[in-house]
Image: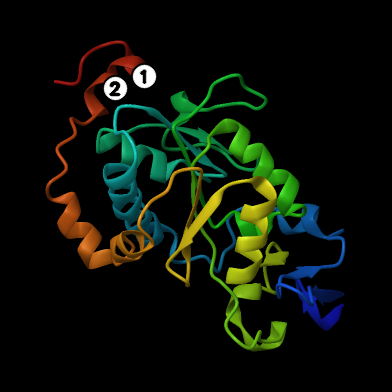
């Protein structure tokens, strides 16, 4: 049902709609996205570096607690490849899928879609709010991996209007889908998986049964850092250097 109107990119007045059942909020068909993605990483995204450091700690914890550290992983929509480089430096065999901008930090670990390669876990940080058709696109992610660890900030209660909440990102025009906890439950049910959440910004889709309490505890950054002190994983930096330049790192 109609929710509100707002101006994106400083010039396009658009409509937002809200699901009366689960509270999911989405824009009208986003005809402005090509222009919005002319600057893939928005100039207002000054938290890019610190966010990747936080994501690295939390992803390491999720893998260590719930999955296998020896498998292949994929960062979906991973931007410049900084997160992939950080995770490989920590010893996790990560690859990158990014259709919209240059992979600057992990260029030899690109994945093109479609691919027959399967991954143990897929990460998607600050991606879900960009999806035009969430159900179909998340279904594609789950074909790459049965486990999807992702971040997107959930709508507060009651849902604020676009002019009242920064996460609509009106100046950038790229955030077209905003979620509630109930909408994540709906997506998980439709896709035949479980969903775990810290009820704020970090969530996990998986067919595995885990403790919601332990998951929520692991999403506390300071606790995650402590857990990671006990993770011993040899860095992939040296072998990656050999792959890039053809000689060992001395």
Tell me if mark 1 has few (under 14), some (14-19) or many (20+) residues whose alpha carbon lies within 10 angstroms of its own.
Answer: few
Residue 244 falls in image quadrant: top left
Which percent across, then down, holds residue 112? 61, 26
Residue pictured at 78% horizontal, 73% vertical: 19
Depth check: 77 or 229 in front? 229
Which percent across, then down, holds residue 104? 47, 37
Tell me if mark 2 has few (under 14), some (14-19) or many (20+) residues whose alpha carbon lies within 10 angstroms of its own.
Answer: some
Residue 131 makes an appearance in the image: yes
Q: Quadrant of the C terminus?
A: top left
In the picture, the disc for residue 241 is: 2
Residue pictured at 61% horizontal, 54% vertical: 188
Which percent across, then down, holds residue 245? 33, 16
To which residue does mark 1 refer?
A: 244
Depth check: 43 or 74 in front? 74
Residue 39 makes an appearance in the image: no
Q: Is residue 108 left or right of residue 143?
A: left
Depth check: 207 or 89 in front? 207
Q: Is residue 26 left or right of residue 74?
A: right
Residue pictured at 42% horizontal, 68% vertical: 198
Which percent across, then down, holds residue 44? 55, 69
Q: Quadrant of the N terminus?
A: bottom right
Up the image or down, 236 lies above or below 84; here it is: above
Up the image or down, 1 lies above or below 206; here it is: below
Q: Secondary structure at mark 2?
A: helix
Up the image or down, 37 lies above or below 212; here it is: above
The reply to whether the C-beta atoms of the residues labelled 2 and 1 are less than 8 Å apart is yes
Residue pictured at 58% horizontal, 70% vertical: 181
Depth check: 54 or 172 in front? 54
In the picture, the disc for residue 79 is: none
Q: Secondary structure at mark 1?
A: helix
Residue 86 falls in image quadrant: top left
Q: Is residue 83 left or right of residue 96?
A: left
């Amino acid at each position: 049902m109609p929710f509100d109107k707002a101006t994106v990119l400083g010039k396009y007045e658009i409509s937002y709609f809200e699901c009366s059942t689960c509270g999911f909020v989405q824009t009208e068909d986003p005809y402005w996205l090509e222009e919005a993605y002319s600057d893939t990483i928005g100039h207002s995204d000054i938290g890019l570096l610190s966010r990747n450091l936080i994501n690295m700690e939390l992803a390491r914890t999720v893998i260590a607690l719930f999955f296998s550290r020896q498998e292949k992983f994929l960062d979906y929509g991973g931007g410049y490849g900084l997160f992939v480089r950080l995770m490989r430096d920590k010893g996790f065999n990560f690859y990158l899928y990014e259709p919209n901008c240059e992979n600057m930090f992990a260029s030899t670990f690109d994945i093109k879609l479609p691919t027959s390669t399967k991954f143990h876990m897929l990460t998607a940080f600050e991606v879900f709010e960009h999806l035009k058709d969430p159900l179909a696109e998340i279904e594609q992610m789950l074909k790459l991996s049965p486990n999807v660890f992702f971040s997107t900030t959930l709508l507060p209660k009651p849902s604020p209007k676009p002019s009242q909440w920064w996460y609509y990102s009106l100046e950038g025009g790229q955030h077209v889908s905003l979620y509630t906890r109930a909408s994540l439950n709906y997506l998980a049910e439709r896709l035949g998986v479980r969903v775990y959440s810290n009820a704020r910004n970090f969530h996990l889709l998986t067919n595995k049964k885990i403790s919601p309490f332990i998951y929520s505890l692991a999403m506390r950054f300071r606790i995650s850092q402590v857990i990671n002190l006990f993770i011993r994983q040899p860095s992939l930096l040296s072998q990656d250097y050999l792959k890039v330049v053809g000689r060992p790192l001395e």
